[in-house]
Image (cartoon, grey):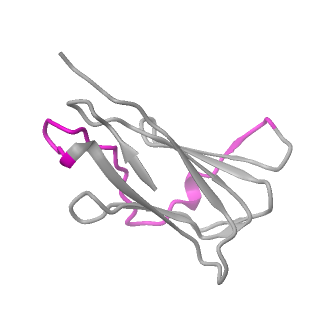
Amino acid sequence: MQVVNLGNIDCPAIFTITGPCTNPSITNATLPGSPTLQFSITMNAGDQMVIDTDFHNVTYYTAGSSIGSSRYYTLVRGSTWFTIPGASGLNMVPSGLSTIQFLTGDPVATGTLTCQSANAWIL
């Protein structure tokens, strides 16, 4: 997916993975080193995992439930928290466009990824 931040500072994102899937990972392929958040977990159909890159939270919701529980412990060692860089500023990327890759350990793509982000400015 493509995520845009037209601002002049990096912006954290909130990613939501919806199962079914196994061992999902989220990579910002635009940043040097392609930082990745990888999880060791099997998600059932309709389950959701919400990853907040600002607060470094990982919350899991079973299908049909509004009560979540932490799954931070499923974060694989060596994972790197990342933000969405702006179009100008310290980690700028052309046009503020970041390429986010979503992979799972499944032979057939089944899970989905959504992203909430914004244009971030500091004056």
Image spot of residue 33 (x, y percent): 24, 65
The reply, left or right, for residue 15 in relation to residue 97 is right
Q: Report the side of 57 relative to 11 (left or right).
A: right
Name which residue lies at 79% across and 54% down: 46
Between 6 and 12, the one nearer to me in the picture: 6
Task: In the displayed orientation, state which residue is furthest to the right.
Answer: 64
> Looking at the image, which residue is at 70% across and 50% down?
48
- Residue lying at the far top of the rendered structure: 123
Range of residues picked out in magenta? 66-94
Q: Is residue 26 left or right of residue 58?
A: left
**Quarter placement of the C terminus:** top left
The majority secondary structure of the magenta stretch comes to loop
- Does 23 sit above or below residue 54? below
- Asked where in the image residue 67 lies, by quadrant, the reply is top right
Left or right of 88, for residue 34? right
- Residue name at image x 63 percent, y 58 percent: 112
The picture places residue 39, in percent across and down from the top left corner, at: 55, 64
76 relative to 53, above or below: below
Q: Is 62 part of what is drawn in magenta?
A: no
Tally of numbered discs: 0
Q: Is residue 86 magenta?
A: yes
